[in-house]
Image (cartoon, grey):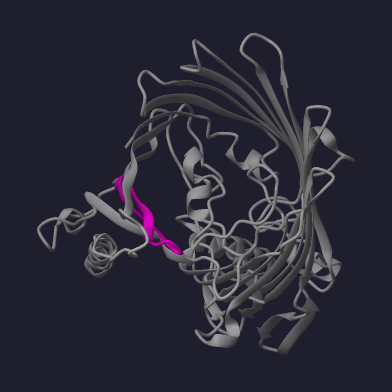
Amino acid sequence: MIRKPALCCAGLLLGVLLALPTSGSRAEPYVRLGGTVKLYTSVFTESGEGAGFLPHDAGDFALTRTALWLKLNGYASDNVSFRARVDLIYTAGTDYDSIADIEAGTGFSSEVQDFDLDFREASFKVMDLMVPGLDLIVGRQRVRWGTSDDYNVIDNLNPVDYANLYSFDPDYFVRHEPMDGFVLEYLFPFDFDLKIQGVYFISFKPSPLPDGFESYMALEQQQALDNRTAPLGLPPGTSHVELADVPDYNIKNGVFGIRLSGNILNFDLGLSYFHGFQTLPLPETIVTDLTTEIPSITGSYGYPHLDVVGFDLAGEIYSVGIWAEVGVYIPEKQDTVVLVHTPLGDMEDRFPLLDRPYTKFTIGFDYTFGVGEGLYWNTQFNRGFYDEFHYTKEADDILGVERSGFLGKLDDYYLTYLEYSFLGDTVTVKLSFLLEVADYGDFADNTTWLLTPEVKFIPFDGTSIEMAYIAFNGATSTKMGAFSDSDIVYLLLKAFF
């Protein structure tokens, strides 16, 4: 639906920035408006359930999205720069089950015309604030930590957008949501690059979740309830999911981070600390009621605190690019309560869900072979994805959480791709391969691979046409294997200005 207040704010911001006065020391103001127009459309090549989120038939469109990204940047004075970005997105509708679905209350917006506005960035930077080398960035922004490609185990300041993770649109893969706040950076006056960065985002922000997530979690609970009640001869019950503990909107619940980085022996090194919250909802209480005529189960979810100590490096040895990251995750010690009301009384289990530090890490390398115009090879290993946790044994015994999948246990991921461009870089072909391993002891039944051949064509400057096929194959018990019936082919067209 069109959000008019947000649209008005975006227009007002654009007008204010264009009208900003410039310092007398700058002869002419620098203001540039640019952007991207894109169309992404994808089609399922087989029928399936799509991991419970996207049931479909072969030939169904998986997603069709048209977008206009508007980017504004420039200088207000010699020491003040600004950046802004607004995304206008139209997503084609899918199911219209009633007349009300296609009624347009305002004359424009309806389920048929599903328009969205995403205010991605609006920030300004004050350089050399009080002392040379001290910069302050204020506003809505994305702060990335880490040196790895795509998967960054220490990149926790901005929450991951899981709603778009399963769209398979390459522009939205592991995209992070912008946050409002302050970044203070100081570059020390040394011969080597040594910088300290402090970040404070003024409030907690949860990760957006994929469509159907609540129904998916309720179904998981329903199955657990049925397993408990069926042997007792009770009828099928009801299942409810609710958020019971969301951090309040106040100053003490902001997100904080500090990072020290530098360059030593031609290697970029970083040491970081993050203090914030888990951005995915985790179970705090699960209440089963067997005292009523219809049994019921209610899961209450919240966002406990999280601290992460990180280290990252990137450099080159004999023309081979190398990078690595390690994050030590320190979860809040908080008990999960499972309560069962029975005619004979209440039964309660109390156990920690996450009670001890655990590690996620990644290591990778890349190299360009002297074949033709250059054959590029990129390989990376990851231990643990963004939505994976190291649960306690007690939690697994009672909830069965130590399995692969969304909100599952830590799995291993091997990623590699070859890329080759020719005809003056107007054509690029790429072959990507991902292997997920959930259990090395039973390798054949606990692995999934993903293969993606891709071709990109640039017919003219400022345009690109990209086509790819994404094939999944493997055990449905793994995260990626749950999409084994969801192979897709997509087309992505862009124009830049």
Residue 446, can we see it? no
Q: Is residue 325 a member of the stretch shown in magenta? A: no
Left or right of 157 on screen, residue 188: right
Which region shows up in magenta? 68-91
The residue drawn where x is 82% and y is 74% is 355
The residue drawn where x is 34% and y is 65% is 23
Most foreground residue, 14 or 264: 264
Left or right of 219 on screen, residue 27: left
Most foreground residue, 472 or 193: 193
Residue 141, can we see it? yes
Name above or below for residue 134 compared with residue 325. below
Q: Residue 229: name its quadrant.
A: bottom right
The residue drawn where x is 59% and y is 82% is 253
Q: Residue furthest right?
A: 441
Q: In x, y percent, where is residue 75? A: 38, 58
Q: In x, y percent, where is residue 57? A: 42, 33
Q: In x, y percent, where is residue 29? A: 31, 55
Q: Is residue 74 a member of the stretch shown in magenta? A: yes
Name above or below for residue 274 compared with residue 57. below
Which corner quadrant holds the N terminus? bottom left
Most foreground residue, 429 or 339: 429
Which corner quadrant holds the C terminus? top left
